[in-house]
Image (cartoon, grey):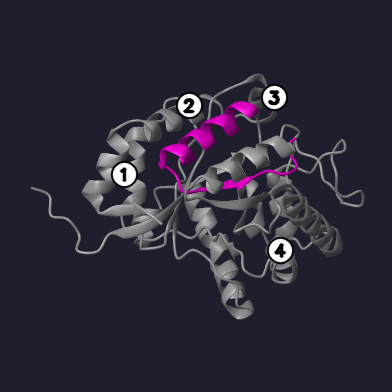
């Protein structure tokens, strides 16, 4: 018999990319309604995000669904800024996330333009949902990039002071974390992010998990249990459940893996795993 932990760990299971396409949004709302996830991050700049998507998400909470709703700050291609003065642009869209990271590392991003765009996305969220976001994170983790994080802290403190902000540093030993190159890069970027957050009095999640190589052969059902290893109380697991439609294919390379995640969270193995591991949703 598996010994149960004395005190269950409460975690956040956050579905990113709400609003990127109708099929993804429908799947995320379904999981929230089932009580299978307890947070979702909204892309207010996505062409498919409309007031109806916000109304539907608000209705779930009004009828008792327990879910935090956050802003998925988006500053990378192929999406376009809400502000007219954002720079640099590539064909009218944000640069790629790689370009954003390189420019941030070199100190070449425009601080005023960043702050204006972040403020515009927070205002759009408030307009559609009728309140400030519960938390803020970033599409492709752009919110922890150098220069972007400083602009975000400055704007969030003024416009959404109660919101916590996702940090992407993982729990566990260095040796264990080296096996995930993408996650290790996020660990490095998150070190300064956490230091700045503490200095500015901004709340963050204590640990993060959910990164893996997005290839078609990935076995999400086998990967997910690893995300819970060493994750402390209040930790966050990122996920990308959804169904595939034409709009998703047009905008994002992450397609059929979303359906694998959705199937796993909808199935019976997932709640059994949480019970076995002594984990509940916050």
Q: CA distance from mark 4 to mark 2?
A: 32 Å
**Residue at which label 2 appears:** 259
Circle 4 Cα neighbour tier, 10 Å, few/some/many (<14 / 14–19 / ≥20): many
Q: Which residues are magenta?
A: 22-46
Residue 90 locus on image (x, y percent):
84, 39
Q: Earlier in the sequence, mark 4 or mark 2?
A: 4
Q: Residue 32 in magenta?
A: yes
Q: Is residue 215 visible?
A: no
Circle 3 Cα neighbour tier, 10 Å, few/some/many (<14 / 14–19 / ≥20): few
Residue at coordinates 59% horizontally, 33% vertically from top-left?
25
Mark identifier at residue 225: 1
Residue 235 locus on image (x, y percent):
42, 59
Mark identifier at residue 250: 3
Q: Earlier in the sequence, mark 1 or mark 2?
A: 1
Judging from the image, what secondary structure is the residue with disc 1 in? helix
Judging from the image, what secondary structure is the residue with disc 2 in? helix
Q: Is residue 250 visible?
A: yes
Residue 29 locus on image (x, y percent):
53, 36
Q: Is residue 134 left or right of residue 209?
A: right
Q: CA distance from mark 1 to mark 3?
A: 31 Å
Q: Residue 23 in magenta?
A: yes
Q: Earlier in the sequence, mark 3 or mark 2?
A: 3
Residue at coordinates 58% horizontally, 69% vertically from top-left?
192
**Residue at which label 4 appears:** 152
């Amino acid at each position: 018999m598996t010994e149960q932990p004395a005190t269950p760990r409460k975690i956040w299971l956050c579905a990113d990319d709400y609003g990127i396409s109708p099929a993804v949004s429908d799947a995320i709302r379904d999981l929230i309604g089932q009580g299978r996830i307890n947070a979702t991050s909204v892309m207010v700049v996505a062409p498919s995000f409309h007031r109806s998507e916000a109304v539907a998400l608000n209705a779930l909470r009004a009828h008792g669904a327990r879910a935090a709703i956050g802003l998925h700050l988006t500053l990378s291609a192929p999406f376009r800024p809400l502000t007219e003065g954002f720079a640099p642009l590539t064909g009218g869209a944000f640069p790629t996330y790689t370009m954003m990271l390189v420019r941030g590392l070199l100190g070449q991003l425009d601080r005023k333009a960043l702050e204006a765009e972040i403020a515009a996305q927070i205002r759009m969220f408030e307009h559609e949902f009728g309140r400030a976001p519960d938390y803020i994170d970033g599409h492709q983790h752009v919110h922890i990039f150098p220069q972007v994080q400083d602009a975000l802290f400055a704007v969030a403190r003024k416009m959404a002071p109660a919101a916590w902000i996702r940090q992407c540093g993982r729990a566990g030993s260095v040796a264990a974390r080296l096996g995930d190159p993408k996650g290790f890069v996020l660990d490095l970027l998150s070190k300064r992010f956490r230091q700045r957050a503490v200095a500015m009095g901004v709340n963050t999640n204590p640990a993060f998990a959910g990164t893996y190589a997005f290839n078609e052969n990935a076995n999400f059902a086998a990967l997910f249990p690893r995300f819970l290893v060493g994750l402390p109380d209040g930790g966050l697991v990122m996920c990308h459940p959804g169904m595939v439609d034409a709009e998703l294919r047009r905008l994002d390379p992450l397609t059929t893996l979303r359906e694998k995640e959705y199937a796993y969270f909808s199935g019976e193995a997932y709640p059994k795993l949480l019970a076995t591991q002594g984990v509940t949703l916050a």
